[in-house]
Amino acid sequence: MQKIISKEVKFKDGVGKIHAISTGTVSVKKRFKLAKGGNILSKINFMMDKEFTEPFPIWAWVIEHPEGIFLIDTGENANVNDEEYFKKEGMFFNWLNTSQFKFDVAPSEEIGVQLSMLNLSPDKIATVVLTHLHLDHIDGLKYFKNSNILVNDYEWKHPSFALPSLYPEWLSPTLMKLHENENSSFTKSISLTEANDLLLIATPGHTKGHCSVLATPENNSYLFAGDVTYDQQQLIDETFAGAHQDFKFAKRTYHEIKKYAAKNKMVYLPSHDWESSVRLEGDIFFS
């Protein structure tokens, strides 16, 4: 198990903390991470690929904010390798999820268990923000029945490769309608706090409704980027993952993030980059 990385930050209305929690690891096909071909051909190529990447972390992020405790994504759970786990999704999705990914998640690595190491419980998490609906971002939802679950309205209504049979039966998320922003680096966003220092921003590409969370405590910014890219180098090089649903949207997202980073000290924190925790801990800015 990776240790939890914690960072103290100063928000407008008080001191807070950011915690990085890895809920196990996942290996993907190499062409899943790095695309070969366009929107459609890249999907065929990664499914035919026989080589896997090294294991990547599955980060979830806790933000202790003066207005409440937020969780960004919920990570994976230890049942993901059970033989029957994907059967309700039909033959194709059962094959896809058991052949294209290799998960390694211990019960002790589930988000609900690890919160206790921060002296927190799931009931203390006021708000859960989902960047998108893929299983390694929603499979810890079972712990958060009493939390407010936020999902981009477009992501909920137009999901890409989501697996509804894995959702908790009680799941009825609050659907967020993002607004156009002419004076912002990002095309669409909505504030999650009264202080406007935690924003849900549209970052489509990996899915068409994919979102990221931008935290702006004093002096620095932290972009919790979900699966915008698999690591920071992909953003620098503007290379696409084979898993991206729309390369045109992804390119626009890359440019918006870079535009923001050119004007602000921003730490870039995608969900499957081992260096994300290093950048968080050391305030290593995107450049």
Image (spheres, grey):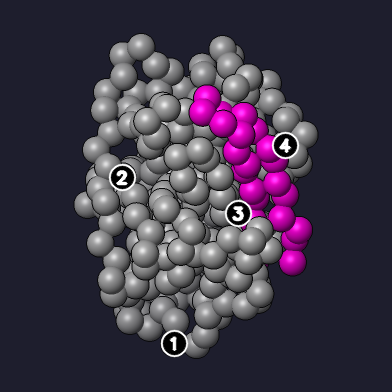
Is residue 4 located in the magenta-colored stretch of the structure? yes
Using the image as rendered, state which of residue 279 and residue 86 is in the foreground: 279
Say which mark, if any, is on residue 84: 1
Local packing at callout 3 (Cα closer than 10 Å; few below 14, some 14-19, many 20+) is: many
Residue 207 drawn at (x, y percent): 38, 46
Local packing at callout 2 (Cα closer than 10 Å; few below 14, some 14-19, many 20+) is: many
Residue range corresponding to the magenta coloring: 1-25
User: What kind of element bears circle 2?
Assistant: strand
Residue 175 drawn at (x, y percent): 25, 48
Query: Of the residues under marks 3 and 1, which one precedes in the sequence?
Result: 3
Query: Of the residues under marks 2 and 4, which one precedes in the sequence?
Result: 2
Image position of 196 with respect to 1: above or below: above
Amino acid found under the numbered disc labelled 3: Trp
Say which mark, if any, is on residue 59: 3
User: What kind of element bears circle 4?
Assistant: helix
The CA span between labels 4 and 1 is 38 Å
Amino acid found under the numbered disc labelled 4: Arg
Amino acid found under the numbered disc labelled 2: Asn
Q: Which residue is mark 2?
A: 152
The CA span between labels 3 and 2 is 20 Å
Residue at the spot x=64%, y=61% of the render? 119
Q: Are marks 3 and 2 in contact (CB under 8 Å)?
A: no
The CA span between labels 3 and 1 is 25 Å
Residue 273 drawn at (x, y percent): 66, 47
User: What kind of element bears circle 1?
Assistant: loop
Using the image as rendered, state which of residue 171 and residue 8 is in the foreground: 8
Q: Are marks 4 and 3 in contact (CB under 8 Å)?
A: no
Residue at the spot x=48%, y=59% of the render? 124
The CA span between labels 2 and 4 is 27 Å
Q: Which residue is mark 4?
A: 279
